[in-house]
């Protein structure tokens, strides 16, 4: 068995535990519910996200489909890009490069670290592991930070 990522212990639990299924680190995201994504940890330029296994996301062999793994990585890397202030920023993916290493079965856990953040562009890398620690995929990406506007006060 391979060992899980060492960065997991460095990521704080944060204030988002117990979020509704359609929320993702404080932001509304219906796809989080559809993909069974749960933001577990965010902070210190890092994020950790769990994707629960769903038979509807399996390939013909019963393993997690590569497209689902790509979605997990995109969302986790994006979360790490805004981990310095999760409620203040959204992001847009500029590019994402993935490398699949092994088949994914059961729940998958992604971790990501923002390696460099500029005024508007962040560079992030991450990985997905099975619960037993097996490395499933790795990714790098760049993301445009988008400041979120506050909701107007009701009149």
Image: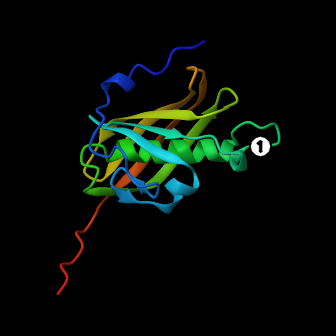
Q: Quadrant of residue 47?
A: top left
Residue 30 horizontal side relative to residue 70, left or right: left
Residue 102: % across, % down:
68, 26
For the point 51% across and 33% down, the residue is 109
Secondary structure of the residue carrying tag 1 is loop
For the point 27% across and 46% down, the residue is 118
Residue 12: % across, % down:
28, 32
* Residue found at the very far bottom of the displayed protein: 155
Question: Vertical placement of 62 versus 102: above or below?
Answer: below
Residue indicated by mark 1 = 59
For the point 29% across and 50% down, the residue is 86
Residue in front for this viewpoint, 91 or 131: 131
Q: Quadrant of the N terminus?
A: top right
Residue 68: % across, % down:
63, 46
The image's colour scheme reads rainbow
Residue 81: % across, % down:
35, 45
Residue 80 horizontal side relative to residue 88, left or right: right
* Residue found at the very far top of the displayed protein: 1
For the point 77% across and 43% down, the residue is 59
Residue 33 horizontal side relative to residue 80, left or right: right
Q: Residues within 10 Å of mark 1 (few under 14, many from 20)?
A: few
Residue 70 horizontal side relative to residue 49, left or right: right
> Looking at the image, how many numbered discs can be counted on the residues?
1
Q: Quadrant of the C terminus?
A: bottom left
Question: Vertical placement of 9 versus 139: above or below?
Answer: above
């Amino acid at each position: 068995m391979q060992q899980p990522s060492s960065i997991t212990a460095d990521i704080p639990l944060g204030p988002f535990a117990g979020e509704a299924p359609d929320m993702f680190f404080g932001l509304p995201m219906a796809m989080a519910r559809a993909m069974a994504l749960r933001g577990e940890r965010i902070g210190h330029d890092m994020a950790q996200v769990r994707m629960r296994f769903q038979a509807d996301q399996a390939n013909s062999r019963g393993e997690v489909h590569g497209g689902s793994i790509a979605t997990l990585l995109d969302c986790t890397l994006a979360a790490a890009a805004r981990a310095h202030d999760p409620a203040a920023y959204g992001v847009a993916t500029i590019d994402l490069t993935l490398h699949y290493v092994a088949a994914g079965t059961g729940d998958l856990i992604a971790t990501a670290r923002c390696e460099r953040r500029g005024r508007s562009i962040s560079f992030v890398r991450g990985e997905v592991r099975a619960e037993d620690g097996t490395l499933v995929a790795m990714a790098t990406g760049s993301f445009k930070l988008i400041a979120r506007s506050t909701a107007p006060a009701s009149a």
